[in-house]
Image (cartoon, helix red, strand yellow):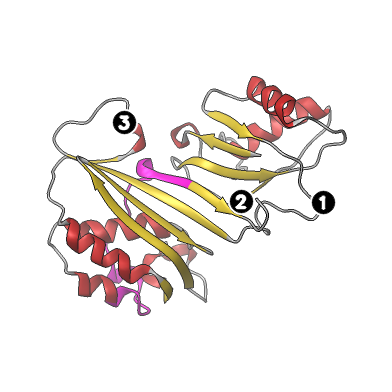
Amino acid sequence: MELSYMGQAFSGWQLQPGVPSVQEALESALSTLEGSPVRVTGAGRTDGGVHARGQVASFDLSREWTPYRLTLALNNNLPDTISVMRASSVPDDFDARGSALWREYAYFIWHGISCYPHVRPMVWWRKVDDWNDREVEECCSYLIGRHDFGAFCKLSEKPDNCYRTILRARYVRRGKLSILRIRGTAFLTNMIRIIVGNLDEVGRGRKNPGWFKDLLNGGDRTDSSTTAPSSGLFFWRVGYDDF
């Protein structure tokens, strides 16, 4: 199933004791329909406060459901902060995480002294409008390809191999709203939010694009800047061979 959710209602995707998670809510709704426990696999984990537009989850049920009836039944048993957008049958060897070819994230920034209250929970509201969009675009071009993203990973969760491949990185500006979309084969912990925090340094003129480019050559987390808030981050899309 493809689902969308509002991240501020959850501690993240993954099951965690004593706190609400998206996985817990989905497994509860599916188990109610099945009459026995159902486990789900997500295409990617999201941290607390991170939203999703196109998360994908796979699971097994003991009987056939039509996509329409399953979507309707699940949405009747889920909180208002989660919605199943569509469901379909897949081959037995399909796995939402293992079968994914790429994942895409989107980050939304609002610039200015005022912000629509409906938009506020879904963006990083920067209360000044001081970004140099041309230099931010230049930095995004450096992201494409295979790089050592060690400077863009949460220090306590840095793996031995920090090389990751970015397939697409696009920055656009629409009035007060900036949108960054990054597609890659895999990501490190907090990688997108740290990228945005470093883009902010360049956009504000505190650092130059060359500094940002150098961070992609095996830099350390302590060499880079802050982690942007979770409020602006969306798990946007997942790509598969046949879907």
**Residue under numbered circle 2:** 43
Q: Residues within 10 Å of mark 3 (few under 14, many from 20)?
A: few
Circle 1: element type: loop
- Residue corresponding to mark 3: 119
Up the image or down, 18 lies above or below 226; here it is above
Q: Which mark is residue 92?
A: 1
Q: Is residue 69 left or right of residue 17?
A: right
Q: Residue at x 18, y 60 (%)?
A: 134
Q: Nearer the viewer, mark 2 or mark 1?
A: 1
Q: Calculate the distance from the C-alpha at mark 2 to the C-alpha at mark 1.
A: 16 Å
Magenta residues, as a range? 214-235
Q: Earlier in the sequence, mark 2 or mark 1?
A: 2
Q: Residues within 10 Å of mark 2 (few under 14, many from 20)?
A: many
What residue appears at the point 45 percent right and 67 percent down from the top-left corner?
166
Spatial CA span between label 2 and label 3: 26 Å
Q: Position of residue 199 (x, y in %)?
A: 25, 59
Q: CA distance from mark 1 to mark 3?
A: 40 Å
Q: Earlier in the sequence, mark 1 or mark 3?
A: 1
Residue 144 occupies which quadrant of the picture? bottom left
Vertical placement of 136 versus 24: above or below? below
Amino acid at pointer 1: Asp
- Mark 2 and mark 3 lie on one chain; the one further toward the N terminus is 2
Residue count near mark 1 (Cα–Cα under 10 Å), binned few <14, some 14–19, many ≥20: few
